[in-house]
Amino acid sequence: MTDAPGGEVASVDSVLVALADPTRRQLLDLLAAQGEATATTLAERLPVSRQAVVKHLAVLDAAGLVSGARVGREVRYAVRPAALDATARWMATLAADWDRRLANIKRVAEAAERDSR
């Protein structure tokens, strides 16, 4: 990562690792659509067991993408957008750096082309 404090680097890394799995991305989509849900409710909508959903939710929780709150005997999970926002900011900064580099390459190539005429 470029120009990011150490804690933010770890946060972005854990978010990218968590998002690498399609089941975890589906879980995030479901939670974003529903607002909050239990692992049992989420497992009913996915082709994996409740135990697998709980393990995926633990990875998402460790990355700061979801949080679980106990309501009676249930744990209800909800999306926490802050870690995703930080990752999006990092990606936007990286994209801007590449755009700047490509613009410099274009400028040099165009100058070399003009000079060769």
Image: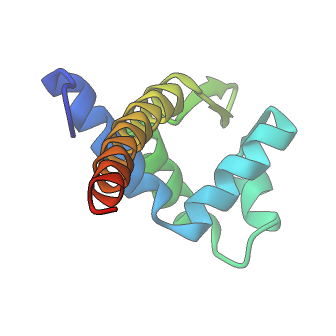
Question: Most extreme residue toward the bottom, as rendered?
Answer: 47
Q: Is residue 92 left or right of residue 101?
A: right
Q: Residue 46 versus residue 112: which sits nearer the camera?
A: 112
- Residue 47, by quadrant, is bottom right
Q: Residue 70 versus residue 61: which sits nearer the camera?
A: 61
**What residue appears at the point 82 percent right and 65 percent down from the top-left corner?**
45
Q: Is there any visible trace of residue 64 in the rendered image?
A: no
**What residue appears at the point 43 percent right and 54 percent down from the top-left corner?**
18
How many numbered circles does the render carry?
0
Question: Most extreme residue toward the left, as rendered?
Answer: 6
In the image, residue 22 lies at what x, y percent? 58, 69
In the image, residue 40 lies at what x, y percent? 73, 56
- Residue 17, by quadrant, is bottom left
Q: Residue 72 versus residue 112: which sits nearer the camera?
A: 112
**What residue appears at the point 27 percent right and 53 percent down from the top-left corner?**
115
Quadrant occupied by the C terminus? bottom left
Question: Most extreme residue toward the front, as rendered?
Answer: 117
**What residue appears at the point 60 percent right and 25 percent down from the top-left corner?**
69
What scheme was used to colour the molecule? rainbow
Please tell me whether residue 44 is drawn above or below residue 114 in the rendered image: below
